[in-house]
Image: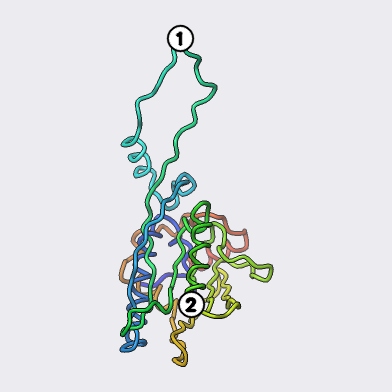
């Protein structure tokens, strides 16, 4: 079974996202491998970032029970100050930050002979789109560009702040960008809810031509293989942010059709 949406399925942006993220990286690598071999290889690299503000994702990406269990496991004994204590009670007690490690997969296209990184395909996570992870990710983007690496960025999450800022950046639900090595220009694909996902170019070393990456094909594969329809109740509202009344009406017709 395929998703009822012609492009990105917004219901995948919630608690299913960590699974979607990992599977999408694996399928992208799978689709690219026969197109780039034998000169290049596609590998998945995992890196860990810390979400220092997981409260904003409770009920969206992080299940409530998991977060509450972590709070209980790390809870320190409560300090009380009796009225007749020899010391002055504090004005306020501010709870410590709760942090959750998030493992993020990135697809790397490497030169098979020298194992040199040629292209990085980043699928954004919510932690990449809010402080302090946003600033760290923006630094990583700059480092990759300075190192002469192509960066293909896939943002299939509506919430959060886009790492790429520019006055001409279109307002859209989903954004894909490509910053080619040794250039200052950023190619942008802006996609709204009703639109199909694009076929993206994956650049290699010159003079080798770009290879195509069909994002919709990748999404269809993981949807079918993972049976996501068994975990989604399309009668409910999708994860936030909320859609407009016109968009909700369109979605209702889509799901009833």
The outermost residue toward the bottom is: 207
The answer to whether residue 223 is seen in the rendering is no
Residue 147 to residue 204: above or below: above
Residue ID at (35%, 25%): 77
The image position of residue 146, as x and y in percent, is 51, 72
**Foreground pick, 257 / 115:** 115
Snapshot quadrant of residue 19: bottom left
Q: Badge 2, how many Cα within 10 Å: few under 14, some, many 20+? A: some
Name the side, left or right, on which 139 lies relative to 22: right
Horizontal and vertical percent position of residue 144: 48, 71
Instruction: Examine the image and state in which quarter residue 230 appears.
Output: bottom left
Q: Which residue: 54% across, 73% down?
A: 177
Instruction: Kindly indicate the quadrant of the structure image that contains residue 191.
Output: bottom right
Question: Could you say which is closer to the camera, residue 115 or residue 75?
Answer: 115
Contact flag, marks 1 and 2 (Cβ < 8 Å): no
Point out which mark residue 112 bears: none
Q: Which residue is disc 1 drawn over?
A: 86
Residue 17 appears in the picture as rendered: yes
> Regarding mark 2 in the picture, which secondary structure is present there?
loop
Count up the numbered dots: 2
Q: Which residue is mark 2?
A: 148
**Percent position of residue 78, x then y:** 38, 24
- Which residue sits furthest right? 167
């Amino acid at each position: 079974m395929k998703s009822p949406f012609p492009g990105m399925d917004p219901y995948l942006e919630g608690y299913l996202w960590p699974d979607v993220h990992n599977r999408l990286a694996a399928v992208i690598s799978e689709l690219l491998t026969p197109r780039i071999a034998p000169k290049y290889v596609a590998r998945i690299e995992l890196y860990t970032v810390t979400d220092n503000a997981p409260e904003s994702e409770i009920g969206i990406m992080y299940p409530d029970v998991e977060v509450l269990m972590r709070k209980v496991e790390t809870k320190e004994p409560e300090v009380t100050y009796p009225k007749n204590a020899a010391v002055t009670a504090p004005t306020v007690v501010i709870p410590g930050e709760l942090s959750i490690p998030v493992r993020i997969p990135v697809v790397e296209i490497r030169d098979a002979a020298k194992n040199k990184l040629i292209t990085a395909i980043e699928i954004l996570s919510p932690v990449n789109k809010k402080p302090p992870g946003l600033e760290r990710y923006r630094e990583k983007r700059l480092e990759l560009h300075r190192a002469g690496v192509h960066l293909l960025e896939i943002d299939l999450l509506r919430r959060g702040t886009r790492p790429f800022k520019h006055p001409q950046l279109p307002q859209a639900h989903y954004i894909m960008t490509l910053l080619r090595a040794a250039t200052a220009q950023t190619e942008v694909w802006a996609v709204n809810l009703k639109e199909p996902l694009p076929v993206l170019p994956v650049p290699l070393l010159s003079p080798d031509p770009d290879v195509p990456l069909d994002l919709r094909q990748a999404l269809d594969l993981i949807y079918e293989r993972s049976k996501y329809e068994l975990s989604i109740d399309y009668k409910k509202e999708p994860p936030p942010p909320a859609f407009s009344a016109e968009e909700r009406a369109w979605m209702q017709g889509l799901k009833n059709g």
